[in-house]
Image (cartoon, helix red, strand yellow):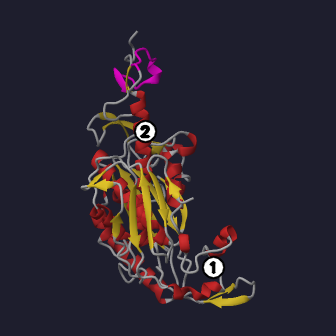
Amino acid sequence: MSSFGQNYRVHTYGESHCKSVGCIVDGVPPGLKLTEEDIQVQLSRRRPGQSDITTARSEFDTVHLQSGTEHGVTLGTPIGLLVQNKDQRPHDYAETDLYPRPSHADYTYLAKYGLKASSGGGRASARETIGRVAAGAIAEKYLKEAYGIEIVAFVASVGKVALPFAEEEDEVLGKEYMDLVNTVTREQVDKEITRCPHKETSKKMEEAIRAAKAKDDSLGGSLTCVIRNAPAGLGEPAFDKLEAVLAHAMLSIPSTKSFEIGSGLRGTTFPGSIHNDPFIEGVDSRTGEQTLRTSTNWSGGIQGGISNGEDIYFRIGFKPPATIAQAQSTARYDGSDGVLAAKGRHDPCVVPRAVPIVETMAAIVIMDMVLQQNARKATASLLPPLTHLPPTMVLPGKSTVQAVVNGKDVGEVQSQKVGEE
């Protein structure tokens, strides 16, 4: 379907070469200061034509707020967002009348619907992600103002060129890579044309992309994304674990092929004695209160499907763009052999432009989870206080504990201290 989320619900519309693309966002809290400029920042980071290693399609992707705000403030009602397509060239796609493009969605859309958009990728085009980015930009603004949450993604690999994930074989992940995860900013990411904040690696990535482009070919790669200052307690047991919903969100982005949380597949090669994250006494960076932290974070900030207050970080793999100008032997729709050299304007590598898409999809997930958790806490706060819970049900040494998670003084449950009675 074209909708995502339960409490923060996003419905996108539009195809690659239609008149406009956009979305309807439901669940935005009332009272959030919001202007088109707040949303435009991420759309401008996503737009095509930013450099000569991206697609030459020229779109400014100017967003127009259609509803849900008045005097620069959200009303709590659905927000409509519209971006007009202006640089359409449907004549570039005449060859797709005869050929299903290899590894593209032409054939599968016909198999599903019995027809397809006559030009471009239709709903499979990355133009569809404009609605996601716009909706996620709103979520980002709320999360930053309400919780201090910041979300940063960066390019981790392009083709066979990759960041130094680990310097030693016995390291789960290396210090240099984890320092980036812990400290990198969007400003640092955007300084590099490839959006890899490691200058030496970025240069090699740029060279690899230019070499592929010169051969009318394409390259895949991967992104790392980190979510900082997310409160503990986000995520639902069983089917809506936080990492499961993040994976759903990320793998719904066009061209994605893989998702890894925390140490990912590399972590599977280590014993539990090395991979476990021991607990230590610490301070909640958001509230300043004493809390439990972990001395390492190979879990990626999620345990049992629920956030633990540490940085949430994950990695997403993207395939090489399917549409390339290099001649490829492939069958026509009628089954006869042919050679396709696709036309149109396409990224030789989508990974640099995917950075804001990943960030905003992550924001949509966290926003949805925050609204769900806050609804639970507010509902629990209306019940009479409990006064005789056994010590095994509460944090030791606490005379009061919140019904669900640390938050803003809602849902407190009175509890006996360990050793009392």
The amino acid on which the numbered mark 2 sits, given as a three-letter code, is Gln
Q: Residue at x 69, y 70 (%)?
A: 111
Q: Is residue 97 above or below residue 252?
A: below
- x, y (%) of residue 302? 46, 45
- Residue range in magenta is 384-401
Residue 394 forms part of the magenta stretch: yes
Q: Is residue 218 shown above or below 406?
A: below
Observer able to see residue 345: yes
- The amino acid sitting under disc 1 is Pro
- What's the mark number on residue 359? none
SS class of the residue under badge 2?
helix
Magenta span: chief secondary structure:
loop
**In this rendering, position of residue 291 left or right of residue 103:** left
| Left or right placement of residue 342 versus residue 156 in this view | right
Residue at the spot of label 2:
373
Residue 106 percent across, percent down from the top left: 62, 76
Binning the other alpha carbons within 10 Å of mark 1 as few (below 14), some (14 to 19) or many (20 upward) gives some
Determine the image quadrant of residue 223: bottom left
**Residue depicted at 38% across the width and 45% down the height:** 310
Label annotation for residue 102: 1
Image quarter for residue 116? bottom right
Cα distance in 3D space between marks 1 and 2: 43 Å
Q: Nearer the viewer, residue 23 or 228?
A: 23
Give the percent coordinates (x, y) of residue 158. Answer: 46, 73
